[in-house]
Amino acid sequence: MANKCHNNLLSLLSRGYEPPTYTSMTLTGSPPPPNTQTPNTPPTSLKSSLFRGSTTVSHLTLENSIFNNVLLRNCVITNGILHNCIIIDCKLQNFVVKKCQVVWRPLASRRFPVEIRGLIFRFAVGEGESGVGEADGKIPALVRALRGDQMLYREVIEVLYRQAVVPLGFVVKMKLADRKLVKRMVMA
């Protein structure tokens, strides 16, 4: 099957062009105005660029660009090549996507700041009343519901491990990074 994405940046790169490269930074254009009666300001536009290395891009129009390991929010992407990215509420036209997480309609909880989400997660998980892997063996419903969203799942699992009483047998099976989050354990 022929590739439908005609990315001009690839042909420019083959001729020695060195594109503007954005690495490990946050780029934000102007979000649309909240009042619909106000005329829309045109979004900031970037063309023929390379984005990589944990860069966050939001509210931009991007043309003929390549993205690797980038978080994209509310962008318009035309003729883009995306690899290992998280794409949230973006309009994509003529693109190639490989190993990306695409979120067309994000959960409402993503719209809250991290601090507010932390409060919601602490309330939903409970203040250490239940343990992880206890006799009932149930993980809170919110934790199970967020398994499909990498970012929110990581946030809620951190809250769970910090607040819940975790059996030592369960801790032994955890990844090292998750073990560091556990604050209270019990012999079981």
Image (spheres, rainbow, N blue to C red):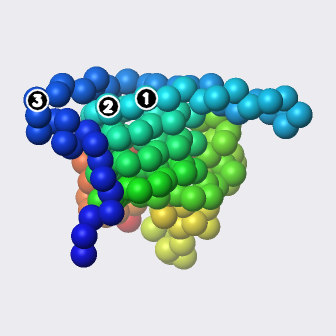
Question: Would residue 44 be found to the left or right of residue 7 on screen?
Answer: right
Q: What is the three-letter code of the residue carrying label 3?
A: Gly
Residue 31 versus residue 111 in the image, above or below? above
Residue 172 versus residue 56 in the image, above or below? below
Mark on residue 49?
2
Q: Which residue is mark 1?
A: 46
Residue 8: quadrant of the picture:
top left
User: Is residue 29 visible in the rendered structure shown here?
Assistant: yes
The residue nearer to you, when weighing 183 against 9, is: 9
Q: CA distance from mark 2 to mark 1?
A: 7 Å
Q: Crowdedness of circle 2 by 10 Å Cα count: few (<14), some, many (20+)? A: some
Mark on residue 21?
none
Q: Nearer the observer, disc 2 or disc 3?
A: 3
Question: Would residue 103 be found to the left or right of residue 121 on screen?
Answer: left
Residue 168: quadrant of the picture:
bottom left
Q: Residue at x 74, y 31 (%)?
A: 40
Q: Are marks 2 and 1 in contact (CB under 8 Å)?
A: yes
Q: Residue at x 25, y 48 (%)?
A: 176
Q: Residue at x 25, y 70 (%)?
A: 2
Q: Which residue is mark 3?
A: 16
* Secondary structure category for the residue under label 3: loop
Q: Seen from this angle, which residue lies furthest right?
A: 37
**If you read the primary sequence from the N terminus, does the residue marked by circle 1 or circle 3 appear first?**
3
Q: What is the three-letter code of the residue carrying label 2?
A: Ser
The residue nearer to you, when weighing 10 against 148, is: 10
User: Is residue 168 visible in the rendered structure shown here?
Assistant: no
Q: Number of marks in the image?
A: 3
Residue 59 versus residue 139 in the image, above or below? above
* Secondary structure category for the residue under label 2: loop
